[in-house]
Amino acid sequence: MTAEAELLLMNASRAQLVREVIRPALSRGEIIVCDRFYDSTTAYQGYGRRLDLQNVRGIVDIAVGNTRPDLTLFLKVSPAVSEERLRSRQATMPFIRDRIEEADRAFFERVAKGYNAIAQAEPTRVKIINATGSVEEVQSAIWRVVAPLAATGGRQT
Amino acid sequence: MTAEAELLLMNASRAQLVREVIRPALSRGEIIVCDRFYDSTTAYQGYGRRLDLQNVRGIVDIAVGNTRPDLTLFLKVSPAVSEERLRSRQATMPFIRDRIEEADRAFFERVAKGYNAIAQAEPTRVKIINATGSVEEVQSAIWRVVAPLAATGGRQT
């Protein structure tokens, strides 16, 4: 599959998800937590697949419209820790890698660089969480960032 | 399906077609004839589904890159003739209508308006063919437009 087709398919799925699931839930007053959303396309298809960043952002904007995240948590670990976690997950619960997970190390280095650039460009929205520690430690770090927002109903103030 | 997801899916398919089929054929020196391509998204998803025209064109540009048609033939008939032809085709060779073909008459009027606007904006590339007559008449009208181009290997001069 070409990088352009991958970009457009990912965002077709996202466009449908936003209108069918996320917006109705938001209008019921619910808080939405997504695992990969707004910034992932910029990181994976823009930085990772090396597609033009402005084109990529234009497509994401069409897919999400004005439904943008109020807060993004960037769970950051070193490549070595990431690979070790993937290996131990594979050992205890084997899974088939998808086309993204099968990409080479240079791809993931570009993706990581992309997430870092996004976090630097929007420090208010994107919070970097050190994810090297235990589940409990990461959970605490996340809660320190989320708690103030939860108090305001999800909107940054 | 939402209009945005339809737009992105159509263009994911087109992005793949351009890179997997059309560009290799062009580089072998072949002439490509497509039934609906570059302008159809503007007409159907832009004018028909009423998505922002600039957004629609941006997505088409990403899907096709610099692989744009040298010549577009707009086969024009009145809505009455179009409906009559659809009815007779349905009678002799029944087919299941897809989600576009099932849209209402107002949708097709907007699409036709879109094609007219495109033809007016780019009269050199887009040629209007009166498609009301017999197959032979339409064929002759098409050939009159195509013959000069075929002599130059497909490129407008």
Image: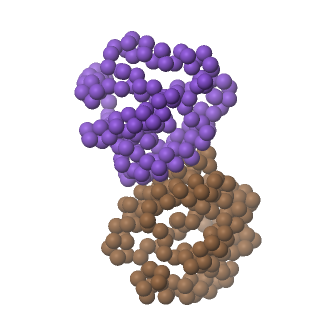
Chain colours: A brown, B purple
Q: How many labels does the image show?
A: 0
Q: Residue at image x 47%, y 84%?
A: A157
Can residue B98 be seen here? The reply is no
Task: Give how far across and how far down residue B155 sits, in percent.
Answer: 61, 25
Which quarter of the figure is the C terminus of chain B placed in? top right
Q: Is residue B13 above or below residue A16?
A: above
Q: Residue at image x 27%, y 30%?
A: B79
Task: Give how far across and how far down residue B130 sits, in percent.
Answer: 36, 21
A142 or B5, nearer to the observer:
B5
Q: Is residue A89 above or below residue A153?
A: above
Task: Give how far across and how far down residue A86 sits, in percent.
Answer: 67, 67
Is A140 on the left or on the right of B123, as rendered? right
Is A128 on the left or on the right of A107, as rendered? left
Q: Is residue A121 above or below residue B113?
A: below
A7 or A155, nearer to the observer:
A155
Task: Give how far across and how far down residue A99 sits, in percent.
Answer: 62, 53
Q: Could you say which quadrant of the image residue A46 lies in?
A: bottom right
A110 or B123, nearer to the observer:
B123
Q: Residue at image x 41%, y 76%?
A: A31
Q: In this view, does B50 lie above or below A42?
A: above
A27 or A77, nearer to the observer:
A27
Can residue B136 be seen here? The reply is yes
Is B129 on the left or on the right of B152, as rendered? left
